[in-house]
Amino acid sequence: TTSFTDEALIALDTLAGRTSELFAPALRIGVTGLSRAGKTVFISSLVHNIVHSGRLPVFEAARSGRIAKSFLEEQPDDAVPRFQYEDHIDSLVKTRVWPDSTRAISELRLTIEYESASAWNRLLGRGKLSLDIVDYPGEWLLDLPLLGKSYAEFSREAWELAELPVRQDLSAEWRERAKTASPAGPANEMDARSLAESFAAYLRACKADRRALSTLPPGRFLMPGDLDGSPALTFSPLPPPNGATPKSGSLHAMMERRYEAYKTHVVKPFFREHIARLDRQIVLVDALQALNAGPAALADLERALTEILACFRPGRGSLLGDLFARRIDRILVAATKADHLHHTSHDRLQAIVRRLTQRAIERAGVEGADVDVVAMAAVRATREGTARQGIDTLPVIIGTPLEGETIDGKTFDGHSETAIFPGDLPRNPDAVFEARADDPMIRFVRFKPPKLERGPDGLTLSLPHIRLDRAIQFLVGDRLA
Ligand code: GDP
């Protein structure tokens, strides 16, 4: 549980934030999702499209021509790395390769000057809003439950999960090592390190496994950020029995101390300094990959989404409830990479994500925030066409598959445009939860990033997308009224 000092500090922080906002309004938007969900691509394309006046018809302020100017500014938090926007755009636009993915937290400030929609407000002059976009790994959010768990509880749960049939083979090496360690023996750095490394290797193997097993804490074991190798990350659960108070100087005591240090010095400050200050949140999910991998992967995505949404649950009784001095009032759950499907399936994808989200919300009990869903492609790497197959015409997508991608036994060289029939999603979203594991509904290859397209003014060039404007409107539209 949190101490009084933590809460007092947060209240002060938030108060300070509020005062400075009286002078320059800012909206803090969190962008998260498990690794490879599309966070880097989303932020890059959002900023590029706003700054370069891309095609954003659903973004009302842009459509009605009220955006006077938008530009990047120095971010307010000196201790947080800057989101490397320019490098990512260079990759996407000049080299046409996908940018490096999110490995840690980063931030970018985009400031928009706009004419107000109301005549009354226009009398007060031009409005100005800064968007502080905070990019961070979803893996880190999944650490929140640890705050309520002792080392003994954490160890017991980790051990039980590791012994489940689906994880048995992946965890075998770590369990073997943990069983031969002597918890009551003297603490030894080399033992601690080898246990921590083999535990981390097991967590990574779960992530890489095609059965798409759910992500297990500690999140920094998967995404260490700049803490790789530090003592707070050099621990591991120990096999039961581990309930007794450990003898001081023992390996057990060392592990417990480091676990507590991880909570105090890594998890709590992350929530206090970053998550508790967010106004709005977008959670990106790779629903297509899950659909491609079958119902078990989909159930797993639902579980991860439930845990992620539970982190934003305000109010009493939740671990973070009291930390939230300010409330996240809007959450958008977005399935990215919709450009892998023909547009006839976009609404169906959205319906599937809506169903997933509803189920997650019911279980996580998120209340008080406005939650919406969208199926989009932050960057659209394909166009559409039709292909004849016998007497049928099939809707296809056309793009350049990345080198080494394969479909129907054919391997691509990374240079040739190809038409692919991706398959369609069922009209009834519930059908995907009952589908057969060996019969994936869609066919998935990764495409090369596209060329820029001309914006509505015919002059500027920006990244093509699908429904990115809908996401922007939901996240910031009302603040530019
Ligand atoms: P992150 O780990 O959440 O930062 O994920 P990235 O933004 O780096 O995205 C991971 C990969 O997903 C990229 O390298 C692309 O291959 C793919 N991707 C992400 N967004 C899109 C999209 O909108 N369209 C397509 N076609 N691919 C995408």
Image (cartoon, rainbow, N blue to C red):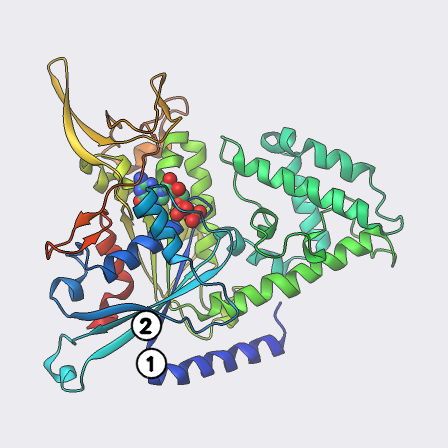
The local secondary structure at tag 1 comes to: loop
In the rendered image, the vertical position of residue 373 relative to residue 406, given as above or below: below
Residue 161 in view in this figure: no
Drawn side of residue 45 relative to residue 226, left or right: left
Residue 117: horizontal and vertical position, in percent? 13, 74
On the rendered image, what quadrant is the C terminus found in? bottom left
- Residues 344 and 152: in front is 344
What residue sits 58% from the left and 67% below the top? 269
What residue sits 74% from the left and 43% below the top? 195
**Contact, CB < 8 Å: mark 2 with mark 1?**
yes
Image quarter for ligand 1: top left
> In whole angstroms, how far apart are the C-alphas of marks 2 and 1?
7 Å
Drawn side of residue 211 relative to residue 443, left or right: right
Q: Could you say which quadrant of the image residue 113 lies in? A: bottom left
- Residues 203 and 353: in front is 203
Drawn side of residue 18 relative to residue 431, left or right: right
In the rendered image, the vertical position of residue 466 relative to residue 133, given as above or below: above
User: Pointer 1: what residue?
Assistant: 24
Crowding at mark 2 (Cα within 10 Å: few <14, some 14-19, many 20+):
many
In the rendered image, the vertical position of residue 227 relative to residue 174, given as above or below: below
- Residues 136 and 330: in front is 136
Residue 87: horizontal and vertical position, in percent? 39, 53
What residue sits 37% from the left and 81% below the top? 21
Residue 150: horizontal and vertical position, in percent? 69, 57
What residue sits 43% from the left and 55% below the top? 309
Residue 130's tag is 2
- Residues 164 and 28: in front is 28
Residue 368: horizontal and vertical position, in percent? 36, 66
Residue 31 in view in this figure: yes
Mark 1 residue type: Ala
On the rendered image, what quadrant is the N terminus found in? bottom right
Q: Quick one: which residue is furthest to the top in this view?
A: 390
